[in-house]
Amino acid sequence: MSVLAGLGGMFGWGISDFLAGLFSKKIGNFRTFFWSQLAGLLFASLLILFFAIQIQMPPFIAVLLPVAAIFYAGAYLLFYKGYEIGNISIVSATINLWAVFTMLFAFIFLGQRLSGMQLLGVIMIIAGVTMVTLNWGSIKNLSIHALKGVRETVAAAVLFGVFWNLSDVIAAEIGWLSTTIFVKIAIILFLLIFSLLFNRQLKMSKITNQTKVMIALVGVLEASAVACFNWGLVVGDVILVTPIASALTIVTITMALVFLKEKISWVQGLGIVVAIIGIILTVF
């Protein structure tokens, strides 16, 4: 069950992240995230027809929900900003760090443990991401710096790590579907307040219908991935489901290389391979 949940997250996030990367460049990260989340909420709400949902919740869960939503919203806005200004392949590889942070926090705060093979996998993920995210051409000039979008993506990975551990606690109390729906409601409310306070543009009147449909598809795929992941947290452990789902990089980067003809250096390509192997090792 944990493997199936992880695979659902892998393909849902892999495809949605590729599409989000394209449209973040066209209409901006904020509008992409807001409207995709609204579409995702509508899709998740339809699941009520097939699965039970729990309305009542303990007081501490009612407090954790908005906190978790803020972490998730902040993570995705930073992640989409990385897509907006950076290379999809590089940003997608860098976000792999969310698995490392999620597993680290689960180890520290939830008492979940890693095997020796999983620990090796985590080290390989870190090494691979380092190889991918540095501008290796500048090493010759002794001026190493991160590529565009990487700083935002690393920050997003940390916030994702915190969020998924909070989601693990919440889902254990109220179930995977309730967690998915209530977090998305809280995210949308947060984004509405944020847009009013900081005058962020939400209107889609000048956006083509094709773009609107694709943004909605991003939301449906992301919501499907979140629902699968939350379900996995209920039937398994976050420290196991996480590395499987984090293989979404394979999907996103493959699509970027095939459809966008994005180019990467051989060192960055090797880094992607190392990170993917690390992800695979963390399953054992």
Image: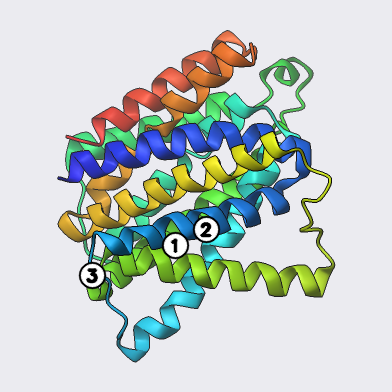
Marks 3, 2: nearer the viewer: 3
- Which element is circle 3 on? helix
Marks 1, 3: nearer the viewer: 3
Q: Residues within 10 Å of mark 1 (few under 14, many from 20)?
A: many
| Disc ID at residue 146 | none
Residue 225 location (% of width, % of height): 38, 46
Query: Eyeballing the image, is 40 above or below 148?
Result: below
| Disc ID at residue 159 | 2
Asked whether the beta carbons under mark 1 and mark 3 sit within 8 Å of each other, the answer is: no
Q: What residue does disc 1 label?
A: 163
- Marks 1 and 3, the one that precedes in the sequence: 1
Which corner quadrant holds the N terminus?
top left
Residue 99 location (% of width, % of height): 39, 45
Query: Eyeballing the image, is 57 above or below 232?
Result: below
- Marks 3 and 2, the one that precedes in the sequence: 2
Q: Amino acid at mark 3?
A: Ala
Q: Residues within 10 Å of mark 2 (few under 14, many from 20)?
A: many
Mark 3 and mark 2: span between their CA atoms? Answer: 20 Å
Please state which of residues 155 and 139 is positioned toward the viewer in this rendering. 155
**Residue 6 visible in image:** yes
Q: Which residue shows up at 30% across the image and 57% down it?
A: 230
Please state which of residues 219 and 18 is positioned toward the viewer in this rendering. 219
Asked whether the beta carbons under mark 1 and mark 2 sit within 8 Å of each other, the answer is: yes
Q: Which residue shows up at 70% across the image and 45% down it?
A: 81
Which corner quadrant holds the C terminus?
top left
Mark 1 and mark 3: span between their CA atoms? Answer: 14 Å
Q: What residue does disc 3 label?
A: 172
Please state which of residues 233 and 40 is positioned toward the viewer in this rendering. 40
Residue 224 location (% of width, % of height): 38, 47
Horizontally, residue 138 falls left or right of residue 273, namely right
Q: Amino acid at mark 2?
A: Leu
